[in-house]
Image (cartoon, grey):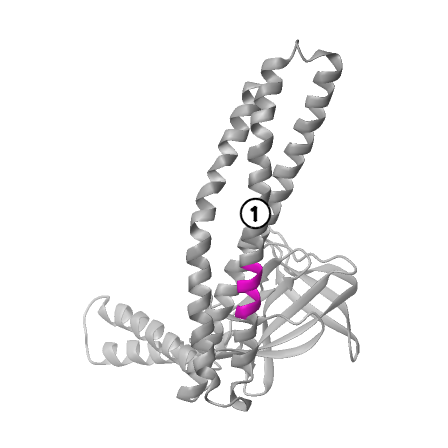
């Protein structure tokens, strides 16, 4: 499963299914730590920060505890989120990943909980949120000082309050942005991360297309088998009673066979293209250990990928024959 940056949605890399890994977003310059493993057990409990009252709403959180099996042993991960938000879910034997923001080599707050088995992603935080309180305090101090300064100078009306609020917002936002755990990268690293992100997006699109074609192929073959069985029953009862419907089925079956053949061709082309993209991703990860001449091969592979996409475009048009099959079924 491919992990996308929770801030800018850039594809960062394939999530590990066990163990720890580090992913980097070249666009946002955030670094993420991934802890992945298989769920052994899980538990949750409600935490009450303020009970429900007559004059105010209650404030609750739910604390989750996941025990994950990793190569180095059992690991317990605890997450919290407001009670009103979507609940985190994972059953035993599900493969999950907890993604946390990093400051340097230090893991900070969790930002995402990903169930790779069900392919669900739950956002549980944002990079840099550990500095939010400090940023608000500094912003508030700046706003209060501005308010007192303008009032002392005799500025009339609500102007000091308005300017103080503006200074508070600007300073708090500026400090928060300044304190976010961004990491500097060299131009060559930036280019490599960008190439990887592009290839990962291509891979995700290819995997989705392969899944769609596989499902369509399974559906069409099931319809073909159902029609063939129906035709056999009609002939057993008496072909003269169902001749019109038998003729319609006889017209539909070749179309379904053609659909299956076209889907097989599409699957072959997309699977080959997917392998080429995976080769590019792995080559890009190992770029520092590869000779520079291999970059020409990478360009050639990308050109070939584009050619394969062009050749499969006309095959996708032929999938409109599905409507003919549905027409036969509705007529029957």
Residue 46 x, y percent position in the rendering: 70, 58
Camera sees residue 5: no
Magenta residues, as a range?
270-277
User: Mark 1 Cα within 10 Å, few/some/many (few <14, many 20+)?
Assistant: many
Looking at the rendered image, the quarter that the C terminus falls into is top right
Camera sees residue 131: yes
Residue 282 x, y percent position in the rendering: 57, 77
Residue 94 x, y percent position in the rendering: 74, 60
- Number of marks present in the image shown: 1
> Who's the residue at 22% across and 69% down the image?
159
| Magenta stretch encompasses residue 275 | yes
Please indicate whether residue 255 sits to the left or right of residue 144 in the image: right
Please indicate whether residue 67 sits to the left or right of residue 23 in the image: right
Please indicate whether residue 188 sits to the left or right of residue 50 in the image: left
Q: Using the image as rendered, state which of residue 161 and residue 40 is in the foreground.
A: 40
Query: Up-down: is 29 above or below 48?
Result: below
> Who's the residue at 56% across and 26% down the image?
251
Q: Using the image as rendered, state which of residue 13 and residue 292 is in the foreground.
A: 292
The quarter holding residue 260 reads: top right
The quarter holding residue 68 reads: bottom right
Residue 128 x, y percent position in the rendering: 50, 76
Which residue is most to the top? 241
> Who's the residue at 33% across and 74% down the image?
170
| Magenta stretch encompasses residue 285 | no
Q: Which residue is mark 1?
A: 263
> Who's the residue at 47% across and 77% down the image?
298
Q: Using the image as rendered, state which of residue 46 and residue 92 is in the foreground.
A: 92
Looking at the rendered image, the quarter that the N terminus falls into is bottom right
């Amino acid at each position: 499963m491919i992990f996308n940056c929770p801030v800018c949605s850039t594809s960062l890399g394939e999530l590990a299914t066990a163990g720890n890994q580090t992913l980097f977003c070249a666009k946002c310059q955030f670094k993420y730590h991934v802890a992945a493993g298989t769920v052994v057990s899980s538990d949750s409990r409600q935490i009450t920060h303020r009970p429900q009252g007559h004059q105010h709403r209650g404030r609750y959180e739910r604390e989750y505890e996941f025990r994950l099996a990793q190569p180095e042993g059992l690991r317990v991960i605890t997450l919290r989120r407001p009670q009103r938000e979507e609940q985190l879910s994972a059953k035993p034997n599900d493969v999950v990943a907890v993604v946390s923001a990093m400051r340097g080599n230090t893991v900070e707050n969790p930002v995402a909980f990903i169930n790779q088995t069900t392919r669900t992603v739950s956002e549980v935080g944002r990079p840099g949120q550990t500095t939010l309180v400090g940023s608000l305090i500094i912003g508030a101090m700046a706003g209060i000082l501005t308010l007192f300064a303008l009032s002392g100078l005799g500025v009339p009306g609500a102007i000091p309050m308005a300017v103080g609020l503006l200074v508070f917002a600007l300073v708090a936002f500026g400090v928060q942005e300044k304190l976010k755990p961004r990491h500097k990268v060299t131009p060559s690293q930036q280019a490599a991360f960008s190439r990887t992100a592009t290839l990962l997006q291509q891979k995700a699109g290819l995997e989705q297309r392969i899944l769609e074609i596989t499902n369509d192929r399974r559906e069409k073959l099931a319809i073909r088998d159902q029609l063939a069985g129906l035709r056999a029953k009609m002939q057993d009862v008496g072909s003269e009673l169902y001749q019109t419907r038998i003729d319609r089925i006889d017209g539909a079956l070749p179309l379904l066979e053609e659909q299956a053949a076209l889907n097989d061709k599409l699957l072959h082309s997309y699977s080959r293209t997917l392998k080429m993209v995976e080769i590019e991703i792995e080559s890009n990860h190992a770029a520092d250990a590869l000779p520079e001449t291999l970059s020409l091969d990478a360009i050639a592979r990308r050109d070939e990928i584009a050619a394969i996409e062009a050749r499969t475009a006309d095959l996708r048009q032929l999938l409109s024959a599905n409507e003919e099959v549905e027409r036969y079924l509705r007529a029957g």
